[in-house]
Image: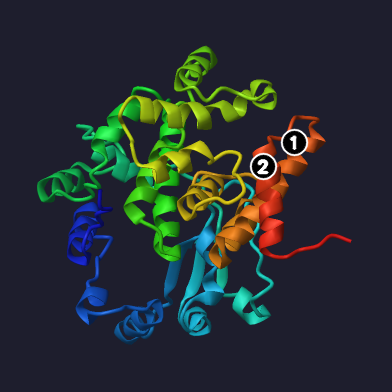
Amino acid sequence: MPGKLASGEHRFEMCRLAFDDERFEVSSIELDRGDRSYTVETLRELKKLYPEDELYFIIGSDMLGTLTRWYLWEEIISLASICAASREKGYVPDLSSFSDEQKKRIILLDVEPFEVSSTEIRAIISRGEEKPALISPEVAEYIRKNGLYDDGLSAYRKILTEKLDDYRMHHSECVSECAAVLAEKYGADVEKARLAGLLHDVTKNTPRAEQLEIIEKSGEGLSEVELINPKVWHQISGAAFLKDNGIISDEEILGAVRWHTTGRAGMTLLEKIVYVADFISADRVYRDVNVVRRLSETSLEHAILYTSRYTVEKLVSADLPIHPATVDCYNDMLLHFRIQKG
């Protein structure tokens, strides 16, 4: 189940096909440089080629928040004006890390966000759709001809497309990709993370009566708190559905599906990864999502402590029951960091 990304040469050729217009020029200078390529080096070369021209570097607004961690970021701003295109409505960037002079070099592009991601496009290709409307016909044909982006999960996607609506399918693809990134970062099995992320919501759209039937057949049963909280049923019914139908036998993956909503004390590395990925996947837009994304760059445990506390506070404020496993998860993270109240 390898996550198969396209080589630089393939990506260059797809860009050439996509921008087959005299107004654009697709450059190969980064490929020609070989080895690791930094943005500042590319801008230096472009400045030498076009010394009298003003350079504009277009990025997504999410990248603006991490720009100060880029290699020689101050020189990047001196070489080019930074154009940040918003990826969400009402975006207000935090520019406190930039000097007044640097702020003058930052342009916020007020554009209508287009709700699509590279994850979704690759999923369309993997599903073998004949006319992927989000991709030019020339690029789509090039991808098919060269067998790009085949991650080996087509059979699982076929199952999901029969059980999930478009919104939930997109979310599952986003969690899958996010889980793979976190697995790479924290040393987990990337293939398992990608698959667990893809399958985590397999019964999310399944009618409640059917979920109860799946759970009953599995022999697990529901506690009194779970019975009055249907939002947690899908993690239980999902793991049972996958196991009882012979779709997944790997206990690690089943555990990641089983605990992705509530969390629990003593989570495995894969369970932590899918739990966090579900909170920070590219499609998530809740109030504190960027906080959790930043915490996940430091440690999974920091992110889990924050999200479990966030969940507990949200449920308490709404007078809703809290799953004991969520409380256990929160306490487990407190003990992990040896935090003591009072």
Q: Quadrant of residue 295?
A: bottom right
Q: Judge from the rendering whether residue 186 lies leftward or rightward of residue 68; answer left or right.
A: left
- Residue 234 point in image, percent of width and height: 52, 28
User: Residue 279: x percent and y percent?
Assistant: 56, 47
The one nearer the camera, 111 or 286, is: 286
Q: Amino acid at mark 1?
A: Leu
Towards the viewer: 305 or 331: 331
Q: Which residue is mark 2?
A: 326
Please give the name of the residue rendered at 53% of the width and 12% of the height, measured from the top-left corner: 209
Quarter of the picture holding the C terminus: bottom right
**Colouring of the image:** rainbow
Asked if 15 appears above or below 280 in the picture, the reply is: below
Q: Is residue 293 something one can see in this rendering?
A: yes
The percent position of residue 10, horizontal first and vertical second, equals 18, 60
Q: Which residue matches tag 1?
A: 315
Going by the numbered disc 2, the residue's amino acid type is Thr
On the question of residue 118 being in view, the answer is no
- Give residue 330's mark: none
Q: Residue at x 76, y 29 (%)?
A: 320
Name the secondary structure under disc 2. Answer: helix
